[in-house]
Image (tube, grey):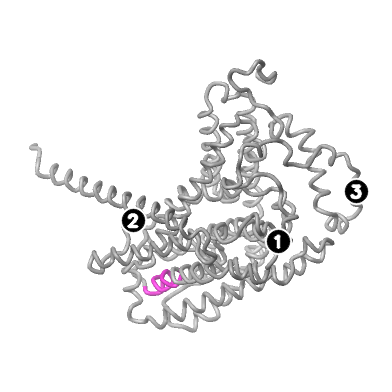
Amino acid sequence: MGFDFGILLASLNKLSTSDHQSVVSINLFVALICACIVIGHLLEENRWMNESITALVIGLCTGVVILLISGGKNSHILVFSEDLFFIYLLPPIIFNAGFQVKKKSFFRNFSTIMLFGAVGTLISFITISLGAIGIFRKMNIGSLEIGDYLAIGAIFSATDSVCTLQVLSQDETPLLYSLVFGEGVVNDATSVVLFNAVQNFDLSHINTTKALQLVGNFLYLFASSTILGVAAGLLSAYIIKKLYFGRHSTDREVAIMILMAYLSYMLAELFGLSAILTVFFSGIVMSHYTWHNVTESSRVTTKHAFATLSFIAEIFIFLYVGMDALDIEKWRSVSDSPELSVQVSSILLGLVMVGRAAFVFPLSFLSNLVKKSSEEKISFNKQITIWWAGLMRGAVSVALAYNQFTRGGHTQLRGNAIMITSTITVVLFSTMVFGLMTKPIIRLLLPSPKNLTRMISSEPTTPKSFIVPLLDSNTQDSDADLGQSVPRPHSLRMLLTTPSHTVHRYWRRFDNAFMRPVFGGRGFVPFVPGSPTEPSGLN
């Protein structure tokens, strides 16, 4: 049997061409990310723009250029991949959010966050699904089944927590930030769980039993995902506390923190859990225990490393969404009826607004009933701001839409193409319009954000506010505070209406007595090479 060198050379040439295209794509994306950083820096003081919108605009402009160069055949240089988004880009963003979040403010509003994130998302899902069924069935948009309509409800219930990080300030509006962003993380996880449940359940015969199974499945996924994230964070804290990697190399400390965080996300994916919730709570636990067990130089390194990875991933996502918005293949499928595509996009945008209003205002009213302090209550102006800031839809919605309505990023069915283009239109419009208007609306409705600073914890959160002296232990409640007498709640209502700092003090007592002796945390002094004594726990 002869060997055909011609076939080998052709294969090598094809491989070389493919590699060259990949190198060109990577070069272009890196250059665009650098451009976004530079332009974002120049627009730092602009009250309208932020990095997300800047990246989106640059992505759109780049897509137009590529479209013109390719003669109208292509608008992007990478094919959308759910794996790229969910496995590589989303983990650092969500983990850093948990790692940097101000825990006092977050857990002080935990009940409201869970009310908005879980119950609110379910209300929004039902509202959007019923609206889509009632309206789209009367329109000629293709053959959509009941599962597609429910998937639409899950897709457009997912808020854009990434863009929320850009338009809200944790220092200026801590209450709004903790509520909107905390709700956004739980909302994304809930939406993904609902989406997977819709795909996995037999929807041809819906009854009470299946509805209860769906609810039970959600509760199981939520609880197990949270437990896995907490366990991963505690395991990393225990390992670093007992082995003292810093005595030989601080690089090992940083590496084990990054890898354990990513491992928690991938384990959740492996077990079919909500990886978003897992890595978020893993970040919270690591910032509370693990981060204090490493050397001082490793603390500075990890704080900035996580923030940098998250920042680059955010820009990458919005760049790609901007490019993919001009994908000519999808728009060609709906070119014969552009009015229908505009109508569908407008209806979906309206359903998003109605669905969010259906839970923000009623649930805010319920939340205010059990809060005594006027500072902790959600005023009507804050409710409007929360409603508006949560209207943005982002990459999670795009990823879920691609999963439901395409195969390998491509579709030829008219109905599916209409839903893809409509999703992209809603994402672009909501990010550009709602995102641009969020900061001015906050300044208009909440002109004195300094009044909210009482909610701010003094712990370091972002790289901009991070300086080494803040590593001291004076940023948490003092031990003297723990010794103050705290009224014990005698009923459920009294427990709900008891000031949240009371629960925090109970937790601090438990934490100091049982958790920190095992897992370390604030006050733990890691071994530093050259120090006169070695920690006693090493033996």
Looking at the image, residue 360 lies above or below residue 523: below
Left or right: 396 as drawn, with respect to 16: right
Give the left or right position of residue 166, taking residue 318 as reference: right
Residue 432 in the image, given as x and y percentages of width and height: 48, 69
Asked if the residues shown at circle 3 and circle 2 are in contact, with their CB atoms under 8 angstroms apart, the answer is no
- Regarding mark 1 in the picture, which secondary structure is present there? helix
Q: Amino acid at mark 1?
A: Leu
User: Is 251 located above or below residue 18 in the figure?
Assistant: above
The tag on residue 115 is 1
Q: Nearer the viewer, residue 137 or 371?
A: 371
Q: Residue furthest left?
A: 2
- Which quarter shows the N terminus? top left
Question: Which residue range is magenta in the image?
Answer: 414-423
Q: Which mark is residue 78?
A: 2
> What is the magenta segment's predominant secondary structure?
helix
Of 528 and 236, which appears nearest the observer? 528
**Residue contact at pointers 1 and 2, CB within 8 angstroms:** no
Residue drawn 35% across the image and 52% down it: 31
- Residue type at mark 3? Arg
Q: Quadrant of the C terminus?
A: top right
Residue 407 seen by the camera = yes
- Find residue 488 and name its label: 3
